[in-house]
Amino acid sequence: GIIATAWIVYINMAPDEMDANLRLSPESSGSRVLSDDPFNVRYDNCIVGAGLSGSVIAENYARLLGQTSLIIEKRDHIGGNCYDYIDDDTGIRVSLYGAHLFHTKHERVWEYVQ
């Protein structure tokens, strides 16, 4: 079978507070409480795929609507094919799936991705 990783989007959290290992407990009513079972929690949304589209949709649910989302992802990282990392040996940022070019003529899209 497919092994999925559960990622949870939290509202009102600074980026440095976000941690994929944090899980909401059923008793938490939205507060940040550790729980070992992210599937034993009620969410506003369930999103399949933590690629570019799934991640943006979940972020918008959280920021614009104040909703939580459970994101089910097959890979062990978010970002889909746009995922990159810092190489331990060289300290250089590497695109795991190769270079990606992003084009848009819309200023609001540039503002969002910055």
Image (cartoon, rainbow, N blue to C red):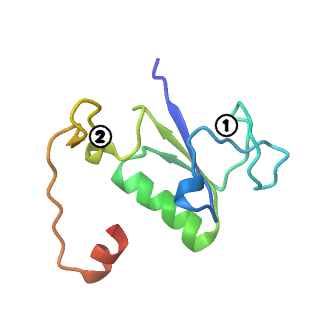
**Quadrant in the picture for the C terminus:** bottom left
Q: Report which quarter residue 109 is drawn in.
A: bottom left
Kindly identify which residue carries mark 2.
Answer: 86
Kindly identify which residue carries mark 1.
Answer: 38
Residue 107, labelled with which disc?
none
Q: Residue at x 26, y 35 (%)?
A: 87
Q: Amino acid at mark 2?
A: Ile
Q: Residue at x 57, y 62 (%)?
A: 14
Q: Is residue 46 left or right of residue 41?
A: left
Q: Residue at x 67, y 37 (%)?
A: 38
Q: Is residue 74 above or below residue 12?
A: above
Which tag is nearer the camera, tag 1 or tag 2? 2
Query: Seen from this angle, which residue lies furthest right?
Result: 27
- The local secondary structure at tag 1 comes to loop
> N-terminal of the two: label 1 or label 2?
1
For disc 2, the neighbor class at 10 Å (few under 14, some 14 to 19, many from 20) is few
For disc 1, the neighbor class at 10 Å (few under 14, some 14 to 19, many from 20) is many
Q: Is residue 37 left or right of residue 29?
A: left
Q: Is residue 51 left or right of residue 45?
A: left
Q: Residue at x 73, y 42 (%)?
A: 41
Q: Position of residue 44 (x, y in %)?
A: 66, 56
Q: Is residue 79 left or right of residue 14?
A: left
Q: Position of residue 17 (x, y in %)?
A: 60, 54
Query: Seen from this angle, which residue lies furthest bottom?
Result: 107
